[in-house]
């Protein structure tokens, strides 16, 4: 359950300094699986669902301290951890067919979203799960 425990522990570690400064940003990494499910990955789904609620709970608790907590919910990205899925021709075809963008995401595409969430432009945004998935979550 590192997917849930690590963000909790890291957040807890940085909070004293943020609270002292009365300013901070926490960005958790959730997943499309925070809201959706597919067979064989139940522990992952459960941990990412926990990230969604951890984000919301922390956002409510920390907003009075001017600390914003949001999460990025990624879809399928071309990363080494997904190598087995990328190399599975059937799964690769399913992702490309199911995603309106017709492809897997590239990791740098998440960077712009993280920069925004960490910026002053997102000072009034907290408790949100922002999805970046090539449209998969909104397509039939």
Image: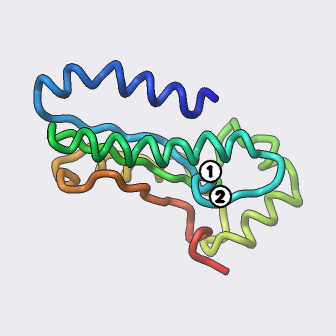
> Separation of disc 1 and disc 2 at Cα?
5 Å
Q: In the image, is 40 to the left or to the right of 63?
A: right
**What percent of the width, then of the height, locates residue 106?**
56, 51
**What percent of the width, then of the height, locates residue 123?**
18, 51
The mark that comes first in sequence, 1 or 2, is 1
Q: What element carries label 2?
A: loop
Q: Name the residue under label 2.
A: 104
Q: Is mark 1 on a helix, strand or loop?
A: loop
Res. 91 image quadrant: bottom right
Q: Along the line of sight, which residue is nearer the eye, 79 or 71?
A: 71
Q: Mark 1 points at which residue?
A: 77
Q: Is residue 40 above or below residue 7?
A: below
Would you say the residues marked 1 and 2 are in contact, meaning their CB atoms lie under 8 Å apart?
A: yes
Instruction: Name the residue rendered at 76%, 57% in the picture.
Output: 38
**What percent of the width, then of the height, locates residue 108?**
48, 47
Instruction: Name the residue rendered at 64%, 54% in the picture.
Output: 76
């Amino acid at each position: 359950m590192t997917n849930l425990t690590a963000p909790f522990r890291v957040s807890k570690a940085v909070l004293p300094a943020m609270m002292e400064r009365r300013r901070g940003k926490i960005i958790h990494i959730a997943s499309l699986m925070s809201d959706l499910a597919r067979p064989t990955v139940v522990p992952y789904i459960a941990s990412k669902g926990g990230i969604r609620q951890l984000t919301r709970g922390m956002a409510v608790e920390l907003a009075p301290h001017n600390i914003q907590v949001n999460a990025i919910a990624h879809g399928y990205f071309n990363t080494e951890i997904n190598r087995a899925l990328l190399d599975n021709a059937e799964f690769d075809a399913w992702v490309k067919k199911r995603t309106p963008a017709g492809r897997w995401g590239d990791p740098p595409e998440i960077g712009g979203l993280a920069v925004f969430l960490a910026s002053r432009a997102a000072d009034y945004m907290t408790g949100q799960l922002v999805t970046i998935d090539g449209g998969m979550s909104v397509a039939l």
